[in-house]
Image (cartoon, rainbow, N blue to C red):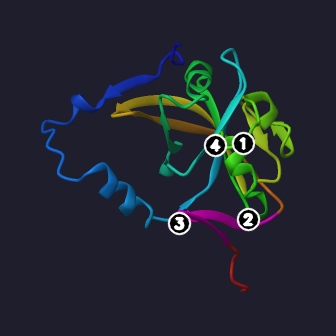
Amino acid sequence: MTARRGATILRAADFLTERDVTVSKAEFREAMARLGAAVNVITTDGPGGRAGFTASAVCSVTDTPPTLLVCANRTNDSYPAMRENGVLCVNTLTGAQQDLSPVFAGMTAHAMAARFDVGHWGSLATGAPVLLDAAVSFDCRISQIAVVGTHDVFFCEVQAVHTGPVHEGLIYFARAYHRIVPSPS
């Protein structure tokens, strides 16, 4: 596995001096269940293969240049492909796409290639699969990687954006899915 050329890799030890952990894993997970987040399918394609997984650990970093942060567990079955390809697409699901979440989370019998049989897919600038009817898709190049505990934090420069036909969202909160529909103006 290799990172895209030019990507900077940072390690937590580079900027942390104390390792005192006062919050238990169970306590942290319970607290995180109270933090609602968009449901995304993260996809990649290239020399490392086509792969995808479900993630809620995605957020905006800056608009100059447009950059997102995506967290991925290094044991995730999509991790090697994403790391080698150096590109990914963040596809934010609508309420009607809730069924894609467990498919890409590996909670069904779908093998990696069969995951892409669900949904309508295309591509933009990087070649990473774009879910054409997602609420929004951010096609990205990985510019930096930080290693933190069990996860890598990917800083991703947005190369293209595709907005889907439906303006609604899907969040995961309190260990359940919730459809978010905009209020009428």
Q: Which residue is mark 1?
A: 108
Q: Which sits earlier in the primary sequence, circle 3 or circle 4?
A: 4
- Whether tag 2 and tag 3 are in contact, CB under 8 A, the answer is no
CA–CA distance in space, label 3 to label 4: 16 Å
Q: Which sits earlier in the primary sequence, circle 2 or circle 4?
A: 2
Amino acid carrying mark 3 in the image: Phe
CA–CA distance in space, label 2 to label 3: 13 Å
Q: In this image, 34 relative to 97: left or right?
A: left
> Label 2: few (<14), some or many (≥20) within 10 Å?
many
Q: In this image, 78 relative to 13: left or right?
A: right
Chain part drawn in magenta: 166-179
Q: Nearer the viewer, residue 36 or 158?
A: 36
Q: Which residue is mark 2?
A: 95
| Residue 105: mark in rendering | 4
* Above or below, comparing residue 178 to residue 1 in the picture: below
Q: In this image, 60 relative to 171: left or right?
A: left
CA–CA distance in space, label 2 to label 4: 17 Å
Amino acid carrying mark 4 in the image: Ala
- Whether residue 7 is visible here, answered yes or no, is yes
Q: Measuring from the top left, give residue 111's x and y in whole percent.
A: 75, 30
Q: Which residue is mark 3?
A: 173
Label 4 secondary element:
loop
Q: Measuring from the top left, give residue 33's x and y in whole percent.
A: 45, 62
Work out which residue is located at the far front of the displayed protein and give it: 109
Tell me where residue 28 sits by quadrant.
bottom left
